[in-house]
């Protein structure tokens, strides 16, 4: 059911459906394939594509390798069409990318930071503002992934960096004019995995992202579960490793103390914490089989507990989690299997590396922007702003911690 009651409303609804289909397929399907997938009449599809091209939302290119007959066209992003600015803010650096409809991503800038909120977010805000000025009304929004729990309104806490209730939109200093989606990096990575990776089409999946420590989130019907306060994706702060060390989050025995870059550094006696030591941790990963095996075993034990609790079909690992699986997969599985309930051992879930590598959080930040844009309201705002020839200037800044809680499905 579309809810459309007039031909105008139905056309607006189908415009969104078509753009969403182009975006979700990576701008890789022909017009005839999209027409068939969406159940549209050929004439209707032609009118929709023409209108979207006029609005500088779509542009068609001939399909490669078509030698005879009528040219087959592939709808894709318009060269003057909407883009998302996506950011992955890690504990020691940030990465800023420009993303087109369909998901093609171009990294614009990478900047190290000192681990403080001001030192990380102020320079990032300047970079985002500069690219927003360059792109003008084309910027559909900004998605920001951060390595910590995010509350409603864009407040983030990153315990091991000492960040408490940091107002991300305020420190970015962008002012009114650009919708901002702020979310946890693991939740964004899981969203991307569900849209473009191994969890696509999986009804219940579990995604774990390992960097300096580990985060995880359950994905149901393509959507990461956020929790009542928007602070899900914190499996790393559950006592799944059997340890008793105090964690910077305030809890004791967190799983993240035994999995990730910090755990690798601690295992070989190096200093850790504060978002520092990535290069040393990568060296340990490449040279210390003992440290890698210990991390893999800790990861496997925690996976078993989460599988018992949530019954996922597939468990995906990104970041250092994928590298632990690659380098010590047997140790990971050997630690996981004894922790599984006997009824799960006959058909345990697959444990697989992410299809997106380290790009998951960045791509999930992009998806959060296009989720808000690919709506009837978002396309109407695009039309108005394009007519004005300038950036959107609403009365107040639109800030969300993510778009997962709202159903923007077509």
Image (cartoon, grey):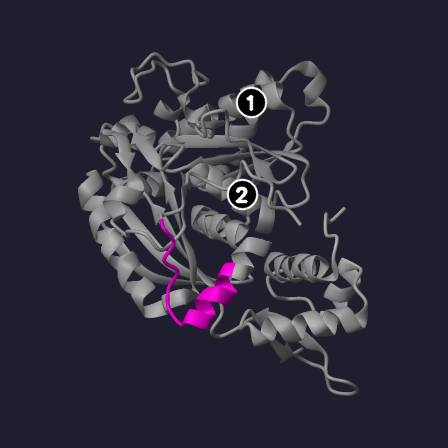
- Packing grade of label 2 (10 A; few <14, some 14-19, many >=20) is many
Label 2: element kind: helix
Which residue is labeled 2 in the image?
191
Mark 1 vs 2, N-terminal side: 2
Which residue is labeled 1 in the image?
306
* Start-end of magenta stretch: 381-395
Q: Distance between the residues labelled 1 and 2?
A: 19 Å
Q: Quadrant of residue 249?
A: top left
- Packing grade of label 1 (10 A; few <14, some 14-19, many >=20) is many
As drawn, which residue projects farthest toward the front?
Answer: 6
Q: Position of residue 87 (x, y in %)?
A: 37, 51
Residue at position x 60%, y 19% in the image: 309
**The magenta stretch spans residue 384:** yes
**The magenta stretch spans residue 79:** no
Residues 226 and 110: in front is 226
Q: Where is residue 181 in the image (x, y as percent from the top left)?
A: 42, 45
Is residue 143 shown above or below 280? below
Is residue 71 shown above or below 374? below
Residues 335 and 109: in front is 109
Is residue 68 shown above or below 91? below
Q: In which quarter of the image is residue 268?
A: top left
* Total count of labels: 2
Residue at position x 45%, y 63% in the image: 83
Residue at position x 68%, y 44% in the image: 201
Q: Residue 363 carries which label?
A: none
Q: Is 284 placed left or right of 52 in the picture?
A: left
> Is residue 115 visible to us here?
no
Label 1: element kind: helix
Q: Position of residue 157 (x, y in %)?
A: 31, 30
Is residue 25 shown above or below 400? below
Residue at position x 79%, y 87% in the image: 69
Residues 143 and 347: in front is 143
């Amino acid at each position: 059911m579309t809810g459309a009651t007039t031909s105008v409303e139905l056309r607006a609804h189908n415009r969104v459906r078509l753009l969403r289909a182009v975006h979700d397929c990576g701008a890789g399907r022909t017009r005839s394939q999209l027409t068939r997938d969406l159940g549209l009449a050929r004439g209707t599809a032609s009118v929709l594509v023409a209108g979207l091209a006029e609005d500088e939302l779509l542009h068609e290119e001939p399909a490669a390798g078509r030698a005879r007959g009528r040219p087959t066209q592939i709808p894709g992003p318009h060269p003057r069409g909407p883009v998302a600015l996506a950011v992955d803010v890690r504990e020691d650096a940030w990465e800023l990318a420009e993303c087109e409809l369909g998901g093609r991503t171009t990294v614009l800038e990478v900047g190290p930071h000192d681990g403080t909120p001001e030192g990380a977010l102020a320079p990032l805000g300047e970079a985002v503002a500069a690219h927003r000025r360059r792109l003008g009304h084309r910027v559909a929004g900004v998605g920001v992934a951060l390595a910590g729990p995010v509350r409603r309104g864009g407040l983030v806490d990153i315990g091991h960096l000492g960040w408490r209730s940091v107002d991300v939109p305020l420190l970015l200093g962008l002012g009114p004019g650009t919708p901002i989606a702020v979310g946890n990096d693991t939740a964004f990575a899981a969203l991307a995995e569900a849209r473009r990776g191994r969890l696509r089409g999986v009804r219940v999946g579990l995604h774990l992202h390992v960097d300096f420590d580990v985060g995880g989130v359950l994905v149901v019907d393509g959507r990461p579960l956020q929790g009542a306060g928007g602070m899900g994706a914190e499996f790393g702060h559950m006592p799944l490793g059997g340890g008793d060390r105090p964690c910077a989050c305030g809890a004791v025995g967190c799983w993240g103390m035994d999995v990730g870059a910090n755990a690798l550094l601690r295992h070989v006696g190096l200093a850790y914490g504060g978002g520092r030591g990535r290069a040393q941790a990568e060296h340990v990963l490449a040279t210390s089989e003992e440290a890698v095996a210990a991390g893999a075993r800790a990861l496997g034990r925690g996976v078993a507990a989460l599988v018992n609790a949530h019954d996922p079909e597939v468990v995906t690992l990104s970041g250092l989690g994928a590298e632990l699986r690659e380098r010590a997969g047997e140790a990971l599985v050997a630690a996981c299997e004894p922790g599984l309930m006997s009824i799960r051992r006959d058909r345990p879930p697959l444990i697989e590396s992410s299809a997106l590598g380290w790009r998951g959080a960045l791509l999930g930040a992009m998806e959060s922007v296009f989720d808000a844009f690919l709506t009837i309201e978002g396309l109407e705002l695009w039309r108005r702003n394009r007519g004005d020839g300038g950036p959107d200037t609403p009365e107040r800044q639109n800030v969300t911690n993510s778009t997962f809680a709202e159903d923007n499905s077509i």
